[in-house]
Amino acid sequence: MTLVLGLVAACGGGDGGGGEKTAKGGNDGTPQVTIVPANGSGKARPDQGVTVTATGGTLGQVSVKLKGADVPGAFSPDKTRWRSKWTLRPGGGYQVSATATSPQGQSTTATSAFRTSRATAATRINNVVPSENETVGTGMPVFVQFNKTVPEKAKPAIERGIEISSTTPTEGAWRWLAAGESFNGLPSVVFRPKRPWKPHQKVSVTVHYAGLKIGDNVFGDKDVTRTFKIGDSHTLNINAKTHRLVAKENGRTVRDWGVSLGSGGEVKNGVDTLLTTSGVHLTMDRSRMERMISPGKKKGDPGYYDEKIPWATRITNSGVYIHQNTEDPTCLGKRNCSHGCIRSPSADAKWLYRWSYRGDLVTITGTKRELSWTNGWAYWQLPFPKWAKGSALDKPITTTRT
């Protein structure tokens, strides 16, 4: 059973930029059927959808099609009104047929064929993350990324138009991120569960963006859908004081090893940039061989480095990785010698590279530098009520069951 969240109900009333088509009943008590937009409309507003109304009777069959496919909609409780569930596709050609029956058994059928406005907004969906069919960790956020800043007035409609479902209903909330808060500089709206996803389930996200009013008389261009999987529960706990990393799968320790974290000792603007950040991180990406260059330094400066590091798993936007140790092996498990990353033995770094998903939870403790929630995918650093305040609708949601 699928229960849809956040429906964008198409607005009724008025001519919707395309007038209305009415099939009038006769003097014998036949009902009247009105269709908005009207037959022949060439620039119907896609944000107002399709409305069918019956007077003097109740609606029976209502058919709305786009390129032969049914357009979903719903009847009012008294079956005198039918409205499309989502907004319409810009430039789409629609065919409508509706029949109403009076209490005396007389019937009226009306039809309408129209086309919606082709005026699409310059603001478009750039990407939806995770990737299609990707298996991700239990901490994974869902990103809807845009190519440019989204107008404030459009955000509530966009949020209502995102349909998200999962095998296990999961409470969470959307939050809008400005370009400066986003890990890749793209304006985004991000879904984060209140608690980690339950493992071994499927999640589906459809952004019903086509036809949403984004600006003055311009509309979202197309819908985007992603389906992905939540894999095993992977958690990493790293302690800067014991110099140990413990990896668990579905609650069971599967591997642990000695590590070396950031040594500290280089303060800029009140922040020790060589300390590893403490907090809840997420694995973001992996690299077989990552080039690492000391930030803000040039060749010849004290502490400058330019190295190629194997088996690197990224956990922040500021350049923190769990990677193979390439320097003093005596530091591992004994003291913190790195520039901020988590150095690991070669075999363990390679194992992690192959074992981890994007979105695995990595908790680091024991350092004096706190992880900022805008540093990469560190969204678990925000308490959930504060996270949910970033929603344009100012409320959490629960995913529907797939």
Image (cartoon, rainbow, N blue to C red):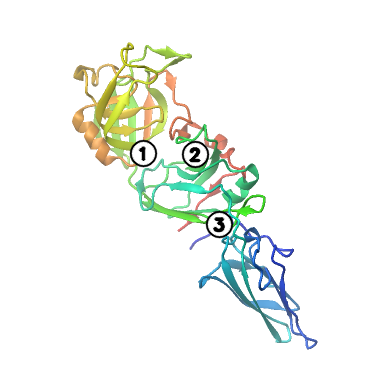
x, y percent for residue 218: 62, 53
Q: Nearer the viewer, residue 268 or 295?
A: 295
x, y percent for residue 161: 57, 53
x, y percent for residue 365: 38, 24
Disc 2 marks a residue whose amino acid type is Leu
Circle 2: element type: loop
Q: Nearer the viewer, residue 380 or 204?
A: 204
Q: Which residue is mark 1?
A: 360
Q: Residue furthest bottom?
A: 28
Q: Which residue is mark 3?
A: 210
x, y percent for residue 62: 61, 75
Q: Which residue is mark 2?
A: 186
Q: Residue at x 44, y 14 (%)?
A: 268
Image quarter of residue 292: top left
Q: Quadrant of the C terminus?
A: bottom left
Q: Name which of mark 1 and mark 3 comes first in the sequence.
A: 3
Give the foreground label among 1 and 3: 3
Image quarter of residue 77: bottom right
Q: CA distance from mark 1 to mark 3?
A: 33 Å
Q: Name which of mark 1 and mark 2 comes first in the sequence.
A: 2
User: In the picture provided, is 377 more to the left or to the right than 180?
Assistant: left
Q: Nearer the viewer, residue 368 or 17?
A: 17
On screen, 21 above or below 195? below
Q: Name which of mark 3 and mark 2 comes first in the sequence.
A: 2
On screen, 339 above or below 161? above
Disc 3 marks a residue whose amino acid type is Ala
